[in-house]
Image: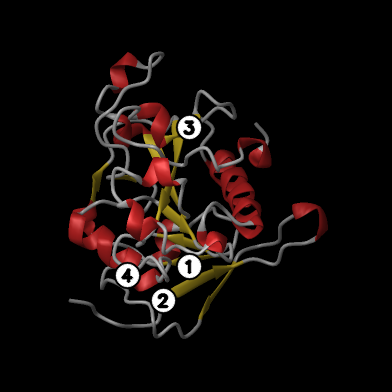
Amino acid sequence: MYTYFKPIIIAILLLSGCSFKAVEVTEVEKETLPIVEDNNAVEHLEGSQIEMTAWFLPKKNSRVRGGSITHIMLHFTNNALHSPEDPYKLEEVYALFEEYEVSAHYMIDRDGEIYYLVPEERAAYHAGKGYLLNFQDYVYGLNDHSIGIELLAIGTKEEMGLNIPDDIYDLIQPVDIGYTDAQYEALNILLEDILRRNPGIKHDREHIIGHDEYARVRKSDPGSLFEWDRIGF
């Protein structure tokens, strides 16, 4: 299923006050991460000034974007249904994206490492069916106009109830529920980078939203445990 090779890491020296220096491209060994053959981090990460790992999903998990980028959508993801006692194995979460042919542009793990999964110029399959009251033209079409960010996290038992039975949820360690400080720190850095490169996205809660605000009936992420004030709202 997978082809293995060295992923490309885009590295930046962050100075005090979050100032930036020129991007340096290096290669490192990450033998545990399966990378698709057409991964081209140098081309698609042009203009980014933060440290992230390119780990592109197959092209069938995205398509050519059909509109301008105006929104960022936040999600949580995990493998708690199949592995409640160890729900954040990266390879298993990545395999779920492949299996269900869904995707997001970025994923942030529990330690705050950022993974780049889909080039921003392509529409990822993360929003699905939904609507926003002030954007009627986007009904069922927000994938074309948004950047999706997945955080490895788990919501409350009630929020996870659509997908995880109570007896399985009870096996999840408390430390694995909710979000980590490292994730908030990384998310702030990523949002700043995305907004700088995409001036069509306004820095407000009408344009930076949760999945539950677009698909209110069927989705609960990022959920009540996500602290919007930790990213300036």
Res. 209 mark: 3
Q: Secondary structure at mark 1?
A: strand
Estimate how packed mark 3 is, as few (under 14), some (14 to 19) or many (20 or more) residues with alpha carbons within 10 Å: some
Estimate how packed mark 2 is, as few (under 14), some (14 to 19) or many (20 or more) residues with alpha carbons within 10 Å: many
**Quarter of the image with the N terminus in it:** bottom left
Amino acid on which disc 4 is placed:
Glu
Q: Disc 3 vs disc 4: which is toward the camera? A: 4
First reached walking from the N terminus: tag 4 or tag 1: 1
Are the residues at dot 2 and dot 4 in contact (C-beta closer than 8 Å)?
no
Task: Answer whether residue 118 is visible to the viewer in this image.
Answer: no
Mark 4 to mark 1 CA distance (whole Å): 17 Å
First reached walking from the N terminus: tag 1 or tag 2: 2
Give the number of callouts: 4
Q: Secondary structure at mark 2?
A: loop
The residue pinned by badge 2 equals: 7
Q: Tell me where residue 2 appears, x and y as whole percent.
A: 22, 77
Are the residues at dot 1 and dot 2 in contact (C-beta closer than 8 Å)?
yes
First reached walking from the N terminus: tag 2 or tag 4: 2
Quadrant housing residue 220? top left
Res. 92 mark: 4
Task: Answer whether residue 71 is visible to the viewer in this image.
Answer: yes
Res. 219 mark: none
Estimate how packed mark 1 is, as few (under 14), some (14 to 19) or many (20 or more) residues with alpha carbons within 10 Å: many
Asked if residue 225 lies left or right of residue 135, the reply is right
The residue pinned by badge 1 equals: 53
Mark 3 to mark 4 CA distance (whole Å): 26 Å
Amino acid on which disc 1 is placed:
Thr
Mark 3 to mark 2 CA distance (whole Å): 30 Å
State whether residue 129 is above or below residue 43. above
Q: Disc 4 vs disc 1: which is toward the camera? A: 4
Q: Tell me where residue 149 appears, x and y as whole percent.
A: 45, 48
Amino acid on which disc 2 is placed:
Pro
